[in-house]
Image (cartoon, grey):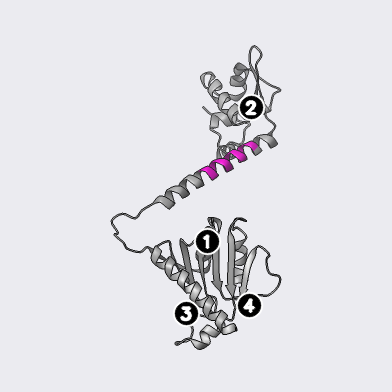
Amino acid sequence: MNAPRDIPNNLLESLKSLGLTKYEALVYIGLLRVAGATATEIHEISGVPRASVYPVLDRLVQKELVSVSYITPKRFDAVPPDRGVENLMRRIETDAESARAALDALYREKRPEGRGNQEQIWTIYGEENIRTRLAGMFRSAERSVEVLATWDLLPESVLALLEAVPDSVSVDIVTDCWEGEEPSRFGIHVLPLATLRETRSPPGKLLPYESSGVFLVDDVRALLRVGSGSEQPSALYSESAGLVLFVRRHITSVTEWARTAAQ
């Protein structure tokens, strides 16, 4: 069946992208042009086959695009476009959130097969890729986010991403300095991290001083970022117990060392 010639194809495609079938789009558009219509009249104005009209109307009622008057014969009317599109967008958002939650549950339950006790560690290259992974870690945080990073890394690469952390999650940041107002919802700990570079042998063994940081979320996801100057930054990411434990001990040891140096 071809659509009525006066309906632009791009309008049909737009409605399809919002979750409507071709028949649903044609019926809705047809109803917008009249002040209510019976199923027979809808068949005539939309071009949708008579046998398909009632099933299509039932779906449009469920999608809150059409209202029905239970007189004899039944008459149907279109919900105004602004409210109709808003209803479609709300359904899309609800379905997307349900899908995200279900997929996340599957992801968290996955178990590597045939790999024994092998630790799964991924190397990430490039600023944008690292930021994308950090953003995902922060958004999915449920209990805690811990950051140990030099100040030159925080303003442009980290702080904006931390805004996505749920309000119920604690956020602790250890850094070498802080410029400007400290966000009230974060725990900020300014410690002389530069002394690590000066006193460790070789210098910078624990934490290279420029553009570096470690990030730990819920004690189950960890990322270590390194890179300085013109070098392309890279990072190690893992949810394995081994790297998570290393990062936990690293944050603890560096923080204790810096606090001792500050005394």
> Are the residues at dot 4 and dot 3 in contact (C-beta closer than 8 Å)?
no
Name the N-terminal-most of marks 2 and 3: 2
The answer to whether residue 239 is left or right of residue 261 is left
Can residue 110 be seen here? yes
Residue drawn at 68 percent across, 64 percent down: 184
User: Magenta region: which residues?
Assistant: 87-98
Q: Quadrant of the C terminus?
A: bottom right
Residue bearing the label numbered 2: 66
Residue bearing the label numbered 3: 206
Badge 2 marks a residue whose secondary structure is: strand
Residue drawn at 47 percent across, 45 percent down: 102
Q: CA distance from mark 4 to mark 3?
A: 18 Å
Between marks 4 and 1 in the image, the one whose residue lies nearer the viewer: 4
The percent position of residue 109, horizontal first and vertical second, equals 41, 50
Q: CA distance from mark 2 to mark 3?
A: 64 Å
> Are the residues at dot 1 and dot 3 in contact (C-beta closer than 8 Å)?
no
The percent position of residue 101, horizontal first and vertical second, equals 50, 46
Query: Amino acid under label 4?
Result: Cys
Q: Is residue 166 above or below residue 126?
A: above
Question: Is residue 189 in the magenta section?
Answer: no
Residue bearing the label numbered 4: 177
